[in-house]
Image: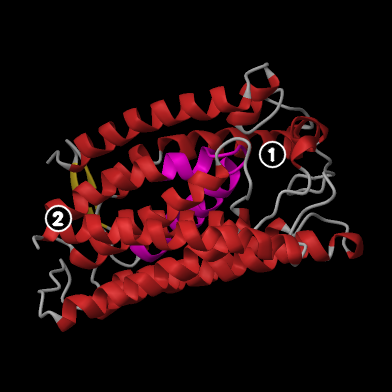
Amino acid sequence: MNDNSFYLFATVISFVTQFFLFIPFINFLYHRKMQRMDQKTTDPFGVRTPIFDRHHAHKVGTPVGGGILVIVVTVLLFAVGILVNLWFARELTSNYPALSAEIFTLMFAMISFGLLGLYDDLSKIFFWQRSQFFGMRMRQKLVIEMILATIISSVLFFVLKIDLVHIPFLGTFHLSYFYILFAAFVIVAFSNAVNITDGLDGLSCGVLMISLIGFWIVARSIIDVPTSLFISVWLGGILAFLYFNVYPARIWLGDTGSLAFGAVFAVIGLILGKPFALLLFGGIFVIEAFTSGVQLLSKRFLGRRIFTVSPFHLYLQNKGWQEPKVVFRMWIFAVICALLGLAASFLR
């Protein structure tokens, strides 16, 4: 079996495994009452969001936690895939001498940010009546995210010896110790960007699937086995989840998945040495986070809204676009972003 066939089979095996696990898992979530039964939401500053509530009131009762299954099974199958490579004496080629550190970084990012998101999901669902805020406070969450991201960026810098940023046509810049802060910021930014984008059925994971296919092509072009295998297995899980998440969704990703997926997406871009291309591959996430961030800051410091409503997908929905129309058109633009990301990845 050649290398590409191995990765494609890994994606198929991951998809089939998680597809059949999702059916009893959804029933389990219903049984454990992992559902939001109240559609009264607030923004990170504790201000009610009636426009969001109005457009999503019909979704009350949909189980939350699809990210739990994808994270657990992806990590396990990735570990199995690494062992299979070792068992059959296949060469685990990497761009870095510390192969175990690359594997650790991918798994730690997925698990640690997943656990943070899980706590946030549980606080939203089970502790709502005891709290004056929706989930964790933004400040608390950001502090923990920065701690986790700093651990990851320190491994990237001190162990994997990554400290450069390549910008097409301008050259390569070595950031030295500033790379730790830079990488931590990128990880936290994309973790929250995917979380913000995860507002419509099939939106965040559909965009992520398209972006990851682009990153898989980059990983294969530089023969990075651990990252290629991780993306392959993860894509299978995302495809299985999307089957149950497209409109009308039978299950939601939850913060467990969105925070973890955004963090790992950023880590992959950093490991592959493509932080600039990461902005293009994740163009939809950048737009969603930008509109949301500008809106929050304008309300906080200017006392008024820049946009009628944010993030961008909710703005379109509030303009009268049907949910599937918003999602499918964003998928199309995600393809364009992925093509631009690929073009930037191969520029010198």
Quadrant in the rendering for residue 198: top right
Is 197 colored magenta in this rendering? yes
Q: Position of residue 283 (x, y in %)?
A: 41, 36
* Amino acid type, label 2: Asn
Q: Is residue 328 left or right of residue 334?
A: right
Quadrant in the rendering for residue 73: bottom left
Give the residue pinned by disc 2.
4
Give the residue pinned by disc 1.
296
Q: Position of residue 197 (x, y in %)?
A: 56, 41
Quarter of the picture holding the N terminus: bottom left
Quadrant in the rendering for residue 347: top left
Which residue occupies the foreground of this view, 82 or 172? 82
Q: Position of residue 97 (x, y in %)?
A: 15, 76
Coloured how?
secondary structure
Which residue occupies the foreground of this view, 28 or 98? 28
Q: Which residues are magenta?
A: 179-208
- Answer whether labels 1 and 2 touch (C-beta < 8 Å): no
Give the secondary structure at mark 1.
helix
The Cα atoms of the two marked residues, 1 and 2, are separated by: 44 Å
Q: Residue at x 40, y 27 (%)?
A: 333
Which residue occupies the foreground of this view, 330 or 21? 21
* Amino acid type, label 1: Leu
Residue found at the far right of this picture? 129
Q: Residue at x 77, y 62 (%)?
A: 33
Would residue 77 be visible to someone looking at this image?
yes
Q: How dense is the environment of label 2, judged by Cα within 10 Å: few (below 14), some, or many (20 and up)?
A: few
Q: Residue at x 23, y 71 (%)?
A: 161
Give the secondary structure at mark 2.
helix
Residue found at the far top of this picture? 320
The answer to whether 105 is drawn above or below residue 29 in the figure is below
The answer to whether 30 is drawn above or below residue 288 in the figure is below
